[in-house]
Structures are given as C-alpha cells and as structure tokens.
Image: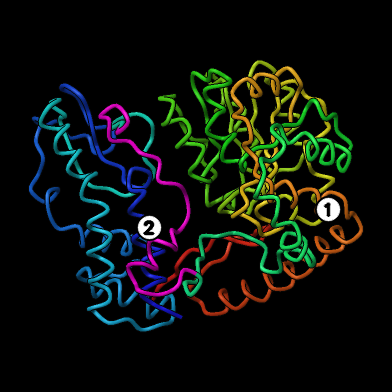
Amino acid sequence: MNPLGIGFVTVGEAFQKSQDIIQCHLILNKGKCHNCGKIVKAKVPKDHQTGYGPRISALIAEMSEIQGNSRETVRTFCKSVLSFSISIGAIQSVVDRASAALKPIYDKIGELARENDINHVDENFGLLPQRGLNLQDSGDFMIQGHGGNIYDISRKLGCRPFDIIDMSSNVNPLGPPPGLMGYLKENIDLITALPEVDAKKISNEFAHRYGLDPECILPGNGTTQFIYAIPQVLKTKKAIIFGPTYSDYADACHMHNVEFDYAIAEESNLFKIDIDLAKKRIEGFDTVFICNPNNPTGTFISAQEIKALCRSFTEKKFIIDESYLSFLEDGDKESMMGLDLSNVIILNSMSKVFRIPGLRIGFLIGPKSIIDRFRQYRLPWSVNGIAQAAVHYLMTRHVEIDRFIEKTRDFIKTERKIFSEMLEGSGRIKVFPSTTVFFTGKAQCR
C-alpha cells in the first residue's frame, strides 16, 4: 500500500475538482450574504490568496473533528481513521500538489471579485450551487473527468499506474467475465479496419438480450458520451440532480451553460431520496438526473417509485442512470428499460459490472422519438471495433454471463457485510446502507 498514492487520490484529486466542493460566498453588487449575513465592500481577503495547505486541513478537520495545523491534522486523520502512518514530508508533497491544482480557482475568484465588485468572499466547504460563481462564464471552465487519474499520479510518483489502488473506480472486483479477454485477443485484427459505422449489430444483440425495440437503442462511446450530449439534445433550460451524486451530470450542465440545482438526500434519511419531498423540489425544472443505484451513496429507489414519479410529471424528461443496477440483487427486475414511458431515458453501462471501462461502451435507451434526436448528433464510428466485439461476446452468451453476474452479486453481498462490519466495529466509521459494490462512511473520530 502506498500512503502517498492513496493520499493524493483522496485529497489532491478532490481539489482538482474544487469548483464542485468549495462553496464561496459570492454576491454581485450590494447585498446580504445568504450564508453568513455579512454586507461588505468588494474585496479579496489576504488569506484567500495564499496558504492552500490550511484549506485541506479545514476539510479534513470538518470531516473528522480533528484539530491542529495542516500537516498534523492530516497525519492524525491518516493514523486514527485510515490506520496507516505517513510522514510530514509525504503529507507536504500531497499538499503542494493539491495547492497547485487549487491555485487557479482561487486566482479566478480574486480576479472576478476585483472586476465585478463581489461583496463578500469567504471560505466554507460544501457543494457549489449553480448560483454564484460560474467559472464557465470566465472562459476558464474545463471538464476534468471524474475519478482518480492513475496515469497522471503514477508519473508524479514514479510508479506504474496499476500499482496504485484507485478507490474512486467502482468496477467489478471479479471482472472481466471469464473468456472475454481471450476472445478479444483472438479478434485483435479488428483494429486494422473501420468498425461498423453505426454499431447496428450490437444494437440488435442488446435489444434481443433485453427484449427491446432496436429503434429505441443507441450505442455510444460510454454513457459519458450521452450524459454530455443530454443538455444539448434535449435543449434543457433548467436541470435538477438527485444528489449527492456522480459529478458528470453537473459537468454536462456546466459545459452547455445550463442552470442546475440539487435535490440532496439527507444523512438523517440514510442518504436515500425522499420521493414526496422530491416531487415538490423538481417543480420548475425540465430535466431530472437520477443515478440509481446512486454513486457514491449506494442507495436505491425502486422502479415502482421512479415510475410513479415519472408519470406524475410527464412534461419533464427523466434521465435514469442504471450503470450500477447489475450489482443489485434482482436488479434486472428493477430496470426502467422496456416500461414504455415517453419521458424517460435510461443509461446502461458495460464498464462497471463487466469491468471494461477502457473500452468505452454504453447504451442509451428511450422512446424512438427521443433516440432519433440523439442520432442526429451521433458521430460515425463512435464505438470502436474491439468494444463492439466485447458487446457481441457479452450479449450472446446468456448462460455464462448470467452465471457471472450472479456470482458477482453473491461475492459483493458477502464482502460488503464483512467490510462494513469491520469498519463499524472499529468505532471510528459509521457505515451507511448500500446496495452496490461501494458505500458511504462517516468518520467518527475520538
């Protein structure tokens, strides 16, 4: 185990996405800060221009209730919560890298504060709502992608990418399925020719596998391709995201300058969305993003509940991301695919349960009228030949693949129970219920 590598994945990578986790008080013109109530002239306090280490310390301290200076706080957290020791020098290296990633964001905050007479800039950690600072408007917004960048980190650490334990990657610990790698090796010659331009063959095989109309299916370069196309294709004006969740939905809205907000599940409800409250919350929005089961909480909303919700708001488009549904016991019975709802679009990923994220293959399922709109934006040859071969293998070997998925579910159910009980038994981490290969924990430091 490489403490420095893990530290950088969990802390430094988070700060590379700082526009998503830093909440600043930003008010244009004269007004009252909705967070603290202060009314002040536009200024950037000096402590917002330097000292990024203390910002990391503040985040760690808030999570764990550990007090101390930046390096000591992180070291105490690693020792008492993560149960490994790390030197002050190694921590400083992590802080330096995180600081370098964070600095441009704070520089932009200062620049906008000086240029636009923002009344108050103050430092707090939490989700950044759409209101307030919009880095895209400044021309500096750039999609970084989600998860840990093991390739970049390995170059900095001088190790191989797969020497790093990437705990941000929620893929099947047992995958890929037996026989798949050998099949792809046997078909490596596919790279010498263009793949089928519209991947129609695998669309038909996917449709046959799940009893769907091929005209209601669109294969793509991972579900990410569709997520980032959704605001443009649907002409979304205002989106709401059931959270806390996967960052790409918000990033897709950012990319197309679409206003968005969150319907946040509360800890008091074990991070499960309250459907009755959600019904009130989604008024005024035209597009709803729901990850189900949800990443990163592992919570699940039954198909019956989602179906009722979608039927209650037929004028809204519901995006249901089922990327992790195959991990769920009886997950096939809980899919929204095939329910024939005119306002529902389903995302289905091959990456997670089959552990082939590097092949980039996913499917969009929905009413033909909506799928046809996405076809207008589809690039030719967007699914490579090896990815198409993988889907053919997975969709045409029903018995073997069904057996593999059942084995996966049994393994995860057993190991999740062992792992969560071990963490709970330490008295230092509260573990919240999950239906998937991952779960959410809260530090309970003494």
* Image point (15%, 58%), residue name: 51
Task: Tell me the kind of residue under disc 2.
Answer: Glu
Q: Is residue 246 above or below residue 30?
A: below
Badge number at residue 330 = 1
Q: Which residues are magenta?
A: 135-161
Q: CA distance from mark 1 to mark 2?
A: 34 Å
Is disc 1 in contact with disc 2, using a CB cutoff of under 8 Å? no
* Residue located at (38% from left, 65% from top): 153
User: What count of labels does the image hold?
Assistant: 2
- The foreground one among 69 and 115 is 115
At label 2, counting other C-alpha atoms closer than 10 Å, the crowd grade (few under 14, some 14-19, many 20 or more) is many
Task: Name the magenta segment's main secondary structure.
Answer: loop
Across and down, in percent, residue 2 comes to 41, 78
Label at residue 13 = 2
- Whole-percent x and y of residue 46? 7, 48
* Residue type pointed to by label 1: Asp
Is 234 magenta? The answer is no
Residue 444 rendering spot, x and y as whole percentages: 44, 69
Q: Is residue 154 magenta?
A: yes
Going from the N terminus, do you reach mark 1 or mark 2 first? 2
Q: Secondary structure at mark 1?
A: loop
Work out which quarter of the rendered image holds the C terminus and state it.
bottom left
Color style of the picture: rainbow
